[in-house]
Amino acid sequence: FAMARGRLSLLLLLCGILAAHSFQLGLLTRNPCIAVNRCLPPASNARPPATRAGARRHPAAGARMALGDRPVRRDRDIHQFVTQRALQSLLGLMHMNRDQITADWLAEWNGHEGIERYHGLNGLQMDWSDYINTLLRAPGETLVVEFKRRGNSGHGGWSGNNPYLKNHVMEMKTEINPRQLAERLMAVREELGREWIEMLPLLQKENDEVWRSWFEKVRSDDGLTDVQANMQLPQLESFDPTNLQGSLFQGGDYDLIKTLATLCATDRVRRRMQGESGGKPQAEFLERMLNVHGIEFEGDMQLGASQRFIEEVLKQSPSVIGGTGYSQTTILDPVGITESILEERVKVASEWADELQSVPADHADMMRALLTEQY
């Protein structure tokens, strides 16, 4: 019994020593404060980082709601979107490397709190070139961060009234260099541009998969089952870009690229049909589909939004439309409309691949303008 008590006392002593030398990183603020450690929450519960002292906090719902409040610009160029994903990738890399202080500062800069966990098309709150140019010219900052040693406050699972554990607070200054952050962002942006150029042609294979699945369902007994679905591999599984390591959020990038390309293609087809003779019913049909089922394209989306939209269009029944308000009787063919959307989606992808070739040149122009101003 005495030996057991001795071992227990030794164990408690060792635990006390470890607790006394444990540190807990506080949340980042301009003025020092004491707070518990925070890590990235899951996507469904993401919250904006801590607000600087003296600034107003966003509502409890978080900044992710604000990111999805604006309507998606269907004609938006790919440069805007690749900048958003580059920013999200850079923040993700910072968190992976335990650089939470810099990541929180960059996420808060110009109102992008919560963007690191945002899966949508409207994450960047300003024009992409304005964002990078402003970040390049932003002044540096010195941030004060506090480290709180676990002590007599119940942190880390220890008793809150232990007289042998004292609170100790240490301060550390962190320098923020916005120009370096902008250069890192441009480097990630170029990497994504090269990756997406090789990834965009996969949309043609996605179109082939849409028709394969549709024909299987048509031939099935219930008209709804694709018996071969479980035997198909995602197109991205076979994607092996030459001389590229693969970006941090490659799967999410590909899903959002498909969604944005589908949205742009659908809107182009709708506008083209509006100008065609007898195309008014088809244009109105697509507008209804966007209003009812295209709501998935807004805000923080779930994976596979583009695929579900295409499937909803294909599910609609053919009809004959005419009468008052129409110049002629028209057959509304959802399958034909889907074919037009998918063909246009491939054209959109090809245009984007060409536009992404200019990403390095855009960055060179920005740096040249900056050096001209300084010298």
Image: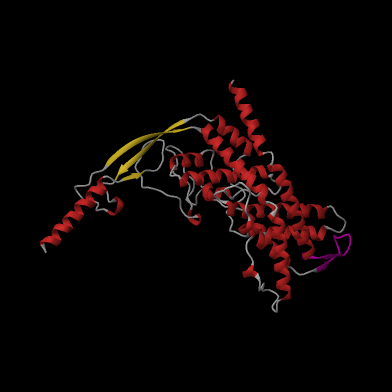
Inspect the magenta stretch and tell me whether residue 288 lies in it: no
Count of numbered tags: 0
Q: Please say whether residue 161 is visible from this viewpoint.
A: no
Inspect the magenta stretch and tell me whether residue 333 lies in it: yes
Q: Position of residue 349 (x, y in %)?
A: 71, 50
Q: Position of residue 11 (x, y in %)?
A: 20, 55
* Residue in front for this viewpoint, 360 or 281: 360
Q: Position of residue 61 (x, y in %)?
A: 50, 52
| Residue at the limit of the structure toward the bottom, as seen here | 221
Q: Would you identify the image quadrant in which residue 282 lies?
A: bottom right
Q: Please say whether residue 321 is visible from this viewpoint.
A: yes
Q: Position of residue 29 (x, y in %)?
A: 41, 38
Q: Quick one: quadrant of the C terminus? A: top right
Q: Quick one: quadrant of the N terminus? A: bottom left
Q: Which residues are magenta?
A: 319-334
| Residue at the limit of the structure toward the top, as seen here | 375
- State the residue at coordinates (19%, 47%): 164
**In the rendered image, the vertical position of residue 285 relative to residue 33, given as above or below:** below
* Residue in front for this viewpoint, 357 or 366: 357
Q: Would you identify the image quadrant in which residue 273 lies?
A: bottom right
With 8 as the anchor, is 187 left or right in this view?
right
* Residue in front for this viewpoint, 70 or 239: 239
- State the residue at coordinates (43%, 40%): 101
